[in-house]
Amino acid sequence: MSDILLRFDFAQSPVRGEICQLQTLCHAVTDRHDYPLPVRTLLGQAMSAVVLMAAMLKLEGSLILQIEGDGPVNLVMAECNHRGEVRAMASHGDDPVPDDGWLAMVGQGRLLLTIDPEDGQRYQGIVPLEGASLAEALGHYFAQSEQLPTEFHLFADGERAGGLMLQVLPGHDQGDDADLWPRVRNLAATLSASEMLSLDAESVLYRLFHEETVQLLAEQALAFVCSCSRARSENALRAIAEDELKQLLDEQSGLIEVRCQFCLQRYPFDRIDIEQLLRHDGSPGSDSLQ
């Protein structure tokens, strides 16, 4: 396995697909943290999902997937941009993390998808957490918001991850093969975790769709890249009131340390740094997560 995304379509039809596989990338994300296996597995699924969805965007920017709940795992976040740069993190308490379904881990809450273009306004969609899996929840999201039939198959084992997405573009009912969509959905449903996590992407597609006319399109390399920086940490501190910053300095022996929740990079700010920030004339930004 390598860290790739491969686009494909079915010839002369509006049905398209994407497949991704992650291995080095999974380790780059999870080896920095002491995540339990169920959390690593859910993170792998979330990374696969965000890679597949980001590839659909016709813009330069990022797609951010957030799972927020009241369960033992209260936050899962995965982000991918148009360059195939991926990062992800999870937050959980001290209680044991159950391994009997994703909703047992995250509880009740919401799923958020945020499109963050480099040039333009953010767009965010929100749906309740529901479904037997993250893949099913994303299918519900697209059915409600995009109104395009979309199906996800997501797999992860804590070491590797992968995903398959199928989607019908507008105009399917005008195609010559009205049975194509249900047929490829049924074929995709036979995909097993062992196939996705052990075979290369082209072999997976051949096993599933060798009786169909599949056209392989662009392939994109994927990599872990964290977008945190000292400048973004400064923006996060500027969003805090002056008296709170001074109180933090007193409580932390004159040194505020901002730590990225993705890569764990630390950015220290002493009293002189904070004074310079407070004198800064620029408009405050906000980055609650680095």
Image: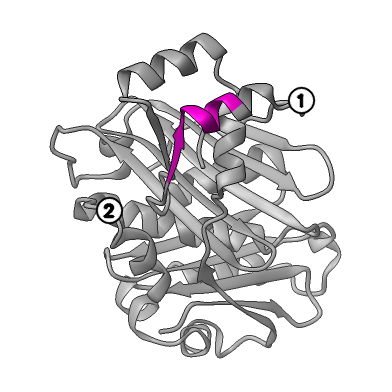
Q: Where are the magenta residues, as a range? A: 267-275
Q: Pinpoint residue 270: horizontal percent, then vertical percent.
A: 45, 32
In depth, the one of 134 and 51 nearer the eye is 51
Q: Which mark is residue 180?
A: none
Where is the N terminus found, in terms of image quarters? bottom left
Q: Is residue 271 magenta?
A: yes
Q: Position of residue 249 (x, y in %)?
A: 40, 21
Q: Residue at x 73, y 54 (%)?
A: 61
Depth order, front residue of 62/19: 62
Which residue is rendered at x = 44% and y = 87% of the image? 200
Depicted 208 relative to depicted 185: above or below: below
| Residue 127 in view, yes or no | no
For mark 1, what is the residue?
281
Say which element carries label 2. loop
Residue picked out by circle 2: 33
For the point 28% across and 49% down, the residue is 39
Q: Is residue 279 above or below residue 16?
A: above
